[in-house]
Amino acid sequence: MKHEGGRLALLKKGGSTARVIDLCSLVESHGHLPEYMMRPMFFDRRLNTSFLVKHTLRPWERDEFGGARRTVTKVIFPMCAQDLDLGGMSVFIESRTMENALMDFLGGSPESERFQSDLERLRSLSKLPSFDPYLLYEHFRRRGDKIARCYFQVSPDVVTQMSEYVAEQIDILVKAAFGGAAVNSRAKSRRLAEIMFENQNSEELSALRQALRMTEDEYNGGIYGWKGILYYAWSVQDAYTLLLNFLKDVRHIDIIGTTTAEQAYLNKVTGRIMQLSGERWARLKSVIENYNDQFQTFVEQGDPLALKNFLLRAPGLFFEMGQDLGSLQHVASYWRFWKGGRGAGPLPASEALELMPGFAAELAVTHSDMEGIHDPVIVKPETIDGMKSEKSKKTTGTW
């Protein structure tokens, strides 16, 4: 276990973000609820009040993982939940010594089924590219783990950032259904947007259920599907510039000091990065464009059936959407972090041979995606140029 300095308060998000699972706040806000007590994320109390963080490795930390990893998952245990300035203790889930460190720190026994269950859940979470709440929910649902819903709420900070985007969608939806009579101002729509993410069963949201013509049984699944689609549509907007800059840099990267064989290999690797990024982007784009089409059809024709059916199906798409978005954000944000630390200038061959294969591996969906790294790959400039054109599109629910 390693000691963490203060500033743990910066990790208090009140829910999940792409980078942090804030279990510390959840016990404060939901610890008294029966569902929280009956269906915890982790059985160990201290583990269930910790922070789980996607951590970008510093150069001096990479040797612990053989030098190949870029990002790991860190568990941070606060020394005092009431005074996070006291810091805490941490361990990397991917560390070879993680199991023994947790046994010593938590007092767990290797024979304990609950301890082994917690270890297995930690390891499964470390394999996810992101902790966004919709990816998390689908991850546990597919595993058959019954976890309380409060663990999958969007953090208040993210809800605030999304509020204008979501309010616009609500405003259009309800006005289309009720001829503008149900919503008299944008302020009302903003209020409904906040309530939708805080308490989707609030009576104040009855107008949304009516607008979508959902039964009460359909409503919970439909609103959950709508929240997730809005979350991903907004997140894609937010990630667009970061991803585009990453791909432009990869396309024009200046590598020096390579042998002929190394340069040929790096051409294939960077080509695969472009290809895999384009494939993940295309999958995200396809789902969001489908939503936009159904939304626009409802606005223009007034029949919500197709939109309602899409929203009811949407949760089944969240795992793949979360994987795609998380992987793209992961490589692009790491590149920005790494580039900012070294400054401008050509990239030495030794650094390129370390960085680029790692990016390609992190973008791969399956091991077979990497098999072609030894085959000729054509780098297609239209992968980037096509993304540029997306920025100029302006439709209902645009991204």
Image (tube, grey):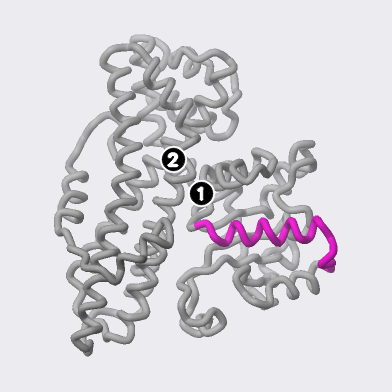
Which residue shows up at 30% across the image and 80% down it? 352
Residue 231 has which mark? 2
User: Disc 1, disc 2: CB below 8 Å?
Assistant: yes
Identify whether 345 is placed above or below 116: below
Amino acid type, mark 1: Asp
Which residue shows up at 76% across the image and 60% down it? 116
- In the rendered structure, does residue 308 fall within the stretch colored magenta? no
Question: Can residue 246 be spotted in the picture?
Answer: no
Amino acid type, mark 2: Tyr
Dot 1: few (<14), some (14–19), or many (≥20) neighbours within 10 Å? many
The local secondary structure at tag 1 comes to loop
Q: Position of residue 285 (x, y in %)?
A: 30, 42
Which residue shows up at 74% across the image and 74% down it? 101
Cα distance, mark 1 to mark 2? 9 Å
| Nearest the eye: 250 or 81 | 250
Secondary structure, magenta segment, majority class? helix
State which region is magenta.
107-128
The local secondary structure at tag 2 comes to helix
| Nearest the eye: 370 or 307 | 370
Residue 132 has which mark? 1
Left/right placement of residue 119 relative to residue 258 reads right
